[in-house]
Structure formats: structure tokens, C-alpha cells
Amino acid sequence: MVNNSVSDALLGLLPSHFRGQLTPLTGGYTNRCWKLETHHGTYWLRQGNPYTLALGINREQELRVHQAAAEAGLAPQLHFANPQQGLLLLDWLTEPDWQQKPRDMSCLAQQVAHLHQLHADVPVLDIADQAAHYCAKLQPLSPELAHYAACFTQADLNLPFQPVLCHHDINAANVMGNRPWLLDWEYAAYGDAAFELAVISDSFSLDTAQQQALLTAYNHAGGQVSDVRFQARLPWVHWLTALWAALQYQQTANAEYAKMQQQALIKLEVICSER
């Protein structure tokens, strides 16, 4: 259980009818989460990472996309939100997450294609600008990071695309149930569908055949992503992951982030050597 002082402070930020018993949950890299049990029902409570500006997170934007996704049946119902505190109170889902069950990637591809047809009042996420933002926060860059930064100016890694509404962080921890539900919309914005699928491929460690099956299922569900554009976005996933992890390590000194950065750079080196 969470200690009384923390519990009282957190519950004090919620409307009175949501007061109840908090149980901390494990998992997640940036946020703190709890199971909230009240007389009216059980809920999932999220308190966001305090380093939102450094990480490029806009809580108002997150809220708008989550609401649109919930109305479309892609995200759990939202019961309360306080963007200034990074608070979200959602339906408690009893279905297992995708870290604990067999994964139907074709079903996920259909949900993603549905998402990419939605609309919300949010800007386009330029991943080159996002990388530049991270690099600015990490100055001076290590020689290793500086080397890779120069590689991402190549034209074949920056192919044109038509922006669609994207989640941008679909991994096993953010996918739940048979529907499946999509959680954690912190980085949601308009973006490149190819990058979205590249994130999924990396998160679930898909091999070449599985990547092609994902693309086929997505395109059959109404999406439009070519293999060329998909392959061009895979290095960006590892690059942004490495920068994000480096920034988290800078903020927290948690060795797990340093490990994550090195793993992403190893993957990046393999892909770049094959191009």
C-alpha cells in the first residue's frame, strides 16, 4: 500500500466522490500509477512524469487525443483529468496487458488503422524536430550521439508522408486486452503512419516476416504505408529511443536508462550498417 501522507495528498487532488484506497502498480518508465478502489467502482490512476517540457510532453494535447480515442472505442473511458498535475483517472481494465498474453498483431494493426482515420485538434509531430529538441537538452552531445545525429539528415531517411493521427508509443505495456485497448497517449499527435508501425515493430521485436504481415494487415484495414517508407523509419525509432533514454538518465541517473540508450544504439548500428 502507499503511505498515508502520499495517499492523502494524491486523493486530495481528485473530486471527493473518487476518494478511496490506493495501491501502487509496478511498470512504466516515466509515470507513477495506482489502482484506486472506491465505493463507486475501481479505477486506474496515473500521475505523470514531472519533466514534461524536457521530454516534449503536452498534457493538454494528450487529453484531447485520449478523449477522441475513447469515443472511438480505442482507449478506456476517462473519468477525471488534471493536465497541470498530469493526473488521469480511467476505467480499471481487468483484461491482461500484452506483456502477459499471446499477441494478435493483425488485430492491433486494425486498431491502429482505425486510429489513423480519427481527427483531433493537435499539431504534427516532426520527429526531426523532436530529435533536435532532445539533442539541445543533451548538449554537449557525446561523440557517439553526435556521429549519429549527422546521419539523420540523409534524404532517404526523410521521405515525404501524409500526416495521420498517431499514438507514437505503442508497446506491450500500452496495449491491453483482446480489443485491444491503447493506453498512454503522452506523445500522440499527427505524424507518419510508417513511424507508428516502426515503433510497433521494434517494441514487439518483429522479424522480417512479421513486419511484412503487420504492414499487410494494416494496409488491408485501410492504411497506406509502403515497405520503403517503413524501412526508412526504423532507424528513427532507435535514434529517438536513444536520445529519450539519455535525457531520462540525465534527469534521474537511473542506470536502466543508460542501458536502454546503449541497446538502442546497438540496434541503430546494425540497421545503419545494412543500409
Image: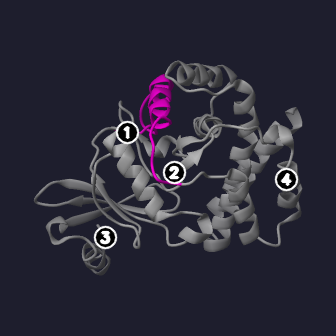
- Marks 1 and 3, the one that precedes in the sequence: 3
Q: Residue at x 53, y 18 (%)?
A: 220
Q: How far across and how far down the image is residue 241, in percent?
A: 67, 52
Secondary structure at badge 2 equals loop
Badge 4 crowding class, 10 Å Cα cut-off, few under 14, some 14 to 19, many 20 or more, is some
Cα–Cα gap, marks 4 and 2: 25 Å
| Residue 62 left/right relative to 4 | right
Asked if residue 270 can be seen in this view, the reply is no
Secondary structure at badge 3 equals loop
Which label sits on residue 2?
Answer: 3
Secondary structure at badge 4 equals helix
Question: Which residue position is annotated with label 2?
Answer: 188
Query: Which picture quadrant has residue 224?
Result: top right
Query: Which picture quadrant has residue 93?
Result: top left
Which label sits on residue 74?
Answer: 1
Q: Residue at x 80, y 40 (%)?
A: 157
Q: How far across and how far down the image is residue 234, in percent?
A: 72, 38
Q: Which quadrant of the figure contains the C terminus?
A: top right
- Marks 4 and 3, the one that precedes in the sequence: 3
Badge 2 crowding class, 10 Å Cα cut-off, few under 14, some 14 to 19, many 20 or more, is many
Question: Which residue position is annotated with label 4?
Answer: 148
Q: Which quadrant of the figure contains the N terminus?
A: bottom left
Q: Amino acid at mark 2?
A: Ala
Cα–Cα gap, marks 2 and 1: 13 Å
Instruction: Tell how many labels.
Output: 4
